[in-house]
Amino acid sequence: MKLLRAICRFAFGILFILSGFLKAIDPIGSALKIKEYLGAFHLGFMDFLSIPSGILLSTAEFLVGVAILKGLRIKFFSKIALGFISFFTLLTLIIFIFNPVSDCGCFGEAIHLSNKTTFIKNLFLLGAALVVYLQREKFRPIATPKIEWGYLVAYGVLIIALQGYSLRNIPQIDFGVYKAGTDLIAAQQENQEREYETTFIYEKDGVQETFTINNLPDSTWTYVDAETHLVGGASEDASVDFSFIDGDGYAVGNEIVNTPGPVFFISIYNARALGKKAVAKIIDLASVLQQHNLKLYIISANTVEETQALFEPYMGMYGGSFEILYADYKMVISLNRSSGGLTYVNSGIIIEKWARGNYPIGSLDELLAQDPEVITAQAQISEQLFAEISLFVILFLIVIIRFFSKIVYRHTVVKGREDVDGEAAEAH
């Protein structure tokens, strides 16, 4: 039973830590998934809670995982863990049956699981949590209650700080479809090569059957419904749709994506987040790019009126240095998580991204002179190192602190018992 208890503690703790950590890297992505859930359950009026809820969820998952894996306040957190996974198991069962969303978002944008796989995973975790809960009296403390709570507070500060950094800047790791190295031209080609098939459902004598357009039944059958399925090409959920319209409503995009050489995009999905200083920096960037015979494209998910109001004071003097285009909210926020963030594309390939205000204006000459493939490789290596080092540090600290805390705690308990025994002997 001791081995089973250890396996369940380890499996549950690791998966919850991973789930919370991957969500924390990209809190905007977590908020988008929560919005999707709210919309699926007709709770769209609560969208304003998506970011706070995402931060709370990832923090809670991470801390529950740390507590279970490390054995901190296990009597308390075993109940929390069981409650957590019971709720998620019920939720994923509903999603598995009714399919309101295509992906649970359990591991953020990093790992996508089918609804069936997610439900099976949660059943496994439910069993692990139940074992930990039933065996909670068998776990020994690794430190005094104050020290154990202190550990959890420290980990809480760490995970909240990571989310704060990602919200203020851009995620340290980009798991989305518009990450560095994405070939937009190839992705657009995949979209054009998508093939769909429409099937028709008819009923006769209480029996329903499916027919294709070339094999429809006779008039004795009653039409029920029609369904369209993707049968070839890129998956819609994983595809890149890099298209937009201009202020007059005309579609543009392919000609910009196919431009040879450098192209720069500013993403604005929340016009209210941009103050006068932020807009002035965008204009400064556009002016510097114009000196290199490059135009800045501003991609907005806001209304034409809201967007033009931001840049109207600069239209006269700097109007030729930038062009405002409009796109779907999800596309804009997926391109760059920072509203006002900059994305560098070279010959249709995404090279690098910067958060609002961190534009490489002073180093633009050096950036344009550098090999784009080298810049992309550096960005990808940086992301990989961040992921590996972060997870190693988190798990290393958990193992080391748990090991030494248990030694110190046992030594303290033994010494305390010896002192008590000594005092009792003197009293006799």
Image: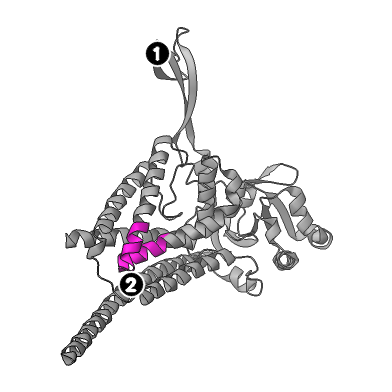
Q: Is residue 75 magenta?
A: yes
Amino acid at dot 2: Ile
| Depicted 37 relative to depicted 67: above or below | above
**Residue bearing the label numbered 2:** 398
Q: Residue under circle 1?
A: 206
Q: Position of residue 205 (x, y in %)?
A: 39, 10
- Residue 93 visible: yes
Is residue 287 in the magenta section?
no
Which secondary structure lies at badge 2?
helix
Image quarter in which the C terminus is found:
bottom left
Q: Position of residue 28 (x, y in %)?
A: 54, 57
Q: Amino acid at mark 1?
A: Gly
Q: Earlier in the sequence, mark 2 or mark 1?
A: 1
Any part of residue 348 in sight: no
- Quarter-of-image position of residue 67: bottom left
Residue drawn at 34 percent across, 49 percent down: 122
Q: Which residue is more in the foreground, 388 or 314?
A: 388
Q: Nearer the viewer, residue 190 or 228?
A: 228
| Start-end of magenta stretch | 61-80
Q: Quadrant of the N terminus?
A: bottom left
- Residue 109 coordinates in the image, percent (x, y): 46, 54
Q: Is residue 377 left or right of residue 133?
A: right
Sort mark 2 into few (<14), some (14-19) or many (20+) by Cα contacts within 10 Å. some
